[in-house]
Amino acid sequence: MSDVNAVKHFLLSLQKDICQQLAAIDGGADFAEDEWQRAEGGGGCSRVLSGGRVFERAGVNFSHVTGKSLPPSASTHRPDLAGRSFQAMGVSLVIHPLSPYIPTSHANVRLFIAEKPGEEPVWWFGGGFDLTPYYGFKEDAVHWHQTAHDLCQPFGDEVYPRYKKWCDDYFFLKHRNEARGIGGLFFDDLNEPDFATSFAFIRAVGNGFLDGYLPIVERRKDLPWGEREREFQLYRRGRYVEFNLIWDRGTLFGLQSGGRTESILMSMPPLARWEYQHQPEPGSPEALLYQDFLPARDWLAESHTHNKEA
Amino acid sequence: MSDVNAVKHFLLSLQKDICQQLAAIDGGADFAEDEWQRAEGGGGCSRVLSGGRVFERAGVNFSHVTGKSLPPSASTHRPDLAGRSFQAMGVSLVIHPLSPYIPTSHANVRLFIAEKPGEEPVWWFGGGFDLTPYYGFKEDAVHWHQTAHDLCQPFGDEVYPRYKKWCDDYFFLKHRNEARGIGGLFFDDLNEPDFATSFAFIRAVGNGFLDGYLPIVERRKDLPWGEREREFQLYRRGRYVEFNLIWDRGTLFGLQSGGRTESILMSMPPLARWEYQHQPEPGSPEALLYQDFLPARDWLAESHTHNKEA
């Protein structure tokens, strides 16, 4: 299947490109590479930057694994495919910046193929990206969502609103009644209208991630910060841990199905803290995160209104 | 049901007693108390000590909640009781010491009662305690398990080995193929031979916890430690987070059924860190934890052999 090779080629070059650009903006540390094999089939390449000037940790993981029996959790809408042999390939990344003024971000693009003798293979793409600020900046949120919107636009007017809402719904901590961040795009089970178009969308998402993220990093990386901001960042990173370990389907699927733990948990923050009954001071920048940034918002509608008013 | 009131009375005095003794040994901070109500019924009292000289955080929680429909996860062996109205009361505690030489510890005693009109109420006790050292000391492990053994002994020879193994099996991180610590006791669905005996066992477990833990705290609290030990402690605390959020049935039951998040997550460490591919130096004290302490062992059999040899 030459299509599959094309996707693999894209994913590997996406991983390389993202790592190069992140290392360039960091300027202090580079990625270490770690190739690994999986007993059941396939393997991957984990690339991790630690202790950088800008990034406390950035992990960019490529994997291409094969298995004899697809777990039900691998597809949202097609549990009927469970039990088929499968292959899955993707790039997944989580970036934990050092500065509390730079948001944590996550991106993922993946292709699943479920096979059964005598039947056509069933394939679907999934992925997206989302942003988790500690201190909110409206212009960053608008830029992030504008980038997401613009890359979706060639694929139809309904794509951005649909995947934006899916992202808001997915990255939500039910036990806190609180969003993980300001969202972005999330989609799964994408196999329409055809492979070529779906693959083109995946490329747009993968390539669009840095268009959304790097300008925010550039804008915020030299802002001075101190112990107060660091403490709040570490506290909020605890929420990131909670989401990933309690609610994230991808993480749980990986850990409970014998995936490579060290690669899956590259998403964990380098340092996180918990505090009983933490309450930000009313009106503080920390309180504004909860009040103005975490509740789901249509950032672009507000931005357009604002532009018209101006 | 006067039995229930007796249990409640015991649990409240256990909470008070444990907090007093922990505050006394800490000498630097005291417990703050936080009473709360639960919308569906019942409530509790959370007591938290933070930033002490000995304990970085200690949380001792009492709760007595009622509900209209028992979730299946509440009982290991009696899923048939799901859907009954219920009440649950218990004391649950997690202690995160500041010194990496003092183990983290956890204890819990609880009573469930499932009710259905026209039928006898079904009751059962559960609980136990377990120890999570960062640096292993054989004499501490033997003392901990000897205490567990001795409090079980009046209830039958088979009690300690059975609940010790249950504890080893339960506090296990499957995704790491690694125990959370050196274990202790764990049991659930205890309703034999009768209420009075089961309640007596619960009292023995609750009261025995400090007999096991305090001598270890006393022995280790003045050992000097530095950045190396602190870093390893924070790294290992990451495992504690992983267990509690991924595998702990009690935590997940609480969070997914609308329990009080701040009380449930009092078990989280004040600070934890993650590192990609952390490997302790062979032969180091950190490596010995993995090699000699985390794999399940019969601490008392070895201790008795040792005594005979001596």
Image (cartoon, coloured by chain):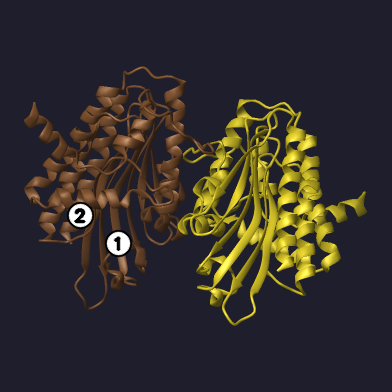
Chain colours: A brown, B yellow
Viewer-nearest residue: A128 or A11: A128
Task: State which chain disc 1 sits on.
Answer: A
What amino acid is labelled 2 in the image?
Answer: Asn
Classed neighbour count for the residue bearing mark 1: other residues with Cα under 10 Å, few (<14), some (14–19), many (≥20): many
- Residue B20, above or below A22: below
- Residue B113, above or below A147: below
Q: Where is residue B98 in the image (x, y as percent from the top left)?
A: 65, 32
**Mark 2 highlights which residue?**
A5
Q: Which residue is drawn at 36% across and 22% down?
A: A28
Q: Is residue A185 left or right of residue B144?
A: left
Q: Where is residue B23 in the image (x, y as percent from the top left)?
A: 73, 35
- Residue B294, above or below B203: above
- Residue B93 visible here: yes
Q: Which residue is drawn at 79% across and 69% down?
A: B196
**Mark 1 highlights which residue?**
A87
> Label 2 near label 1: C-beta < 8 Å?
no
Q: Which residue is drawn at 60% across and 51% down?
A: B44
Q: Is residue B152 left or right of residue A177?
A: right
Classed neighbour count for the residue bearing mark 2: other residues with Cα under 10 Å, few (<14), some (14–19), many (≥20): few
- What secondary structure is marked by label 2? helix
Q: In which quarter of the image is the N terminus of chain A?
A: bottom left
Asked if labels 1 and 2 share a chain, the reply is yes
- Residue B300 numbered tag: none
Picture quadrant where residue B134 is located: top right
